[in-house]
Image (tube, rainbow, N blue to C red):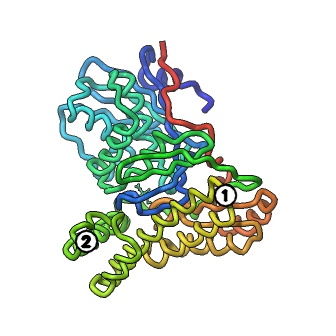
């Protein structure tokens, strides 16, 4: 970012004295898809793209927000109703403000300017980065002392209440708690997390953007979550110890197969098998067994395509073509699916072959320069004096 945050703020709202600058990274999920809202395991890591937010407190109850990259502005009032429907970035910024007001933590308005380098709508968590950066800046401006996990939870709730996406906690958690050069194993049942080293030994995770965009709220994402809940209700009726899909083992699932509707059975099979894959992948990664990690990525994609049905022909094509290249250990869709990106584990010596094979299939090839597992970490970078 070339223009300093203070200059950016001044351009929109005048004197920046007292403003707080915070930034939070996007993430890429290495493995563990659609498991977070089923109390399962995920393994995301941060990327070298982030959102930066500058916030200054006001003495009245007005909120003025500028989206610097888009040239858009909104002037709002904490005491007036706000329509969040079809409003782009508004829920992710104003939702965080609003939620903190509702919880009695904030009583004054703010001025906010934000900008970012996370591609939007590509499944790399630009919205989580915006929420987390906003929450971090507000935390300092109003001395809230939110602990990092509570902050991730708050941002997840914002997504549910203001953006209408009933997501899990992975994206906000990864953006807030991700650490450089490590993946983050999160147990989404109790929110225990472990930073897992990534000895990549001559390999790289490469992101490829399919260019297919589908808004999460408009997609089948919420539908998939509802299906998982239906399956739990069904299974709980037969076995009261099952309170989420996390409680299912391959054996218990096999036992109930005949009684579950086939599509719900397939959804369950994905979640059960994906949870196993995440735990195994973690061990393999820590031990440097990259070929085994790659095989798990491949299996994850097939399960997302066949059992969870969240892939897209463009993503399947990218994965298929990637696997044709010697030196590609694994390839899979990352994030919610229905479009967005693939993540690929590629030997550095095969990068040019990989590019040659994949480049003709995508319009915008720039995602491949995204660095995965970087020094980028959520933090307050400056208090302007
Ligand atoms: C989106 C959601 C996450 C998670 C993934 C799928 O990124 O925000 O909570 O469910 O999809 O793994």
Residue furthest to the top in view is 385
Q: Residues within 10 Å of mark 1 (few under 14, many from 20)?
A: some
Q: Is residue 304 left or right of residue 342?
A: left
Cα–Cα gap, marks 2 and 1 = 39 Å
Please provide percent x and percent y for residue 195: 54, 44
**Residue marked by disc 1:** 365
| Residue 336 occupies quadrant | bottom left
Dot 2 and dot 1 residues touching (CB under 8 Å): no
Q: Please give the name of the residue rendered at 59% of the width and 71% of the height, measured from the top-left corner.
A: 298
The tally of labels here is 2
Q: Residue 368: x percent and y percent?
A: 67, 55
Which of these two is toward me, 211 or 253?
Answer: 253
Task: Check the image and report above or below for 188 versus 344.
Answer: above
Looking at this view, is 306 or 80 the one in front?
306
Establish whether ligand 1 lies closer than 8 Å to the Cβ of label 1: no
For this orientation, the residue located farthest to the bottom is: 258
Could you say whether the residue bearing mark 1 is in a helix, strand or loop?
Answer: loop
Q: Nearer the viewer, residue 51 or 298?
A: 298
| 2 vs 1, front mark | 2
Quarter of the view holding residue 256:
bottom left
Classify mark 2: residues with Cα within 10 Å, few (<14), some (14-19) or many (20+): few
Residue under label 2: 230
- Residue 294 x %, y %: 64, 65
Spot occupied by residue 28 in the image (x, y as percentages of width and height):
54, 53
Image point (18%, 32%), residue name: 79
């Amino acid at each position: 970012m070339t223009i300093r945050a203070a200059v950016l703020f001044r351009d929109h709202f005048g004197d920046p004295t007292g403003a707080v600058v915070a930034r939070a990274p996007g993430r890429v999920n290495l493995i563990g898809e659609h498991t977070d809202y089923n109390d399962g395991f995920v393994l995301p890591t941060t990327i070298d793209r982030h959102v930066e937010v500058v916030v200054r407190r006001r003495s009245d109850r007005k909120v003025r927000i500028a989206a610097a990259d888009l040239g858009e502005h909104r002037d709002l009032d904490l005491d007036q109703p706000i329509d969040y429907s079809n409003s782009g970035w508004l829920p992710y910024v104003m939702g965080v403000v609003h939620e903190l007001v509702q919880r009695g933590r904030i009583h004054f308005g703010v001025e906010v300017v934000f900008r970012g380098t996370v591609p939007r709508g590509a499944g790399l968590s630009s919205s989580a980065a915006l929420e987390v950066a906003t929450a971090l800046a507000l935390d300092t401006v109003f001395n809230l002392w939110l602990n990092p996990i509570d902050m991730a939870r708050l941002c997840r709730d914002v997504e549910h209440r203001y953006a209408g996406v009933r997501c899990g906690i992975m994206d906000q958690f990864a953006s807030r708690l991700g650490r450089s050069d490590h993946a983050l194993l999160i147990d989404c049942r109790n929110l225990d997390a472990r930073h897992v080293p990534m000895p990549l030994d001559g390999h790289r995770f490469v992101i490829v953007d399919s260019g297919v965009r589908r808004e999460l709220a408009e997609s089948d994402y919420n539908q998939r979550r509802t299906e998982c809940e239906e399956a739990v209700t069904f299974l709980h009726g037969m076995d009261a110890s099952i309170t989420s899909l996390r409680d299912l083992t391959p054996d218990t699932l096999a036992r109930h197969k005949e009684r579950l509707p086939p599509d719900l059975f397939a959804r369950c099979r994905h979640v059960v098998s994906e949870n196993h894959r995440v735990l195994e992948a973690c061990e393999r990664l820590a031990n440097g067994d990259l070929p085994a990690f790659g095989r798990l990525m491949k299996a994850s994609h097939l399960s997302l395509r066949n059992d969870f049905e969240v892939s897209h022909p463009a993503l399947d094509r990218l994965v298929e073509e990637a696997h044709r290249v010697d030196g590609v250990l694994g390839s899979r869709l990352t994030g919610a699916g229905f479009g967005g990106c693939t993540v690929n584990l590629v030997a550095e010596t095969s990068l040019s072959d990989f590019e040659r094979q994949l480049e003709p299939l995508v319009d915008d090839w720039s995602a491949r320069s995204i660095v995965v597992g970087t020094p980028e970490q959520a933090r307050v970078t400056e208090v302007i004096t």
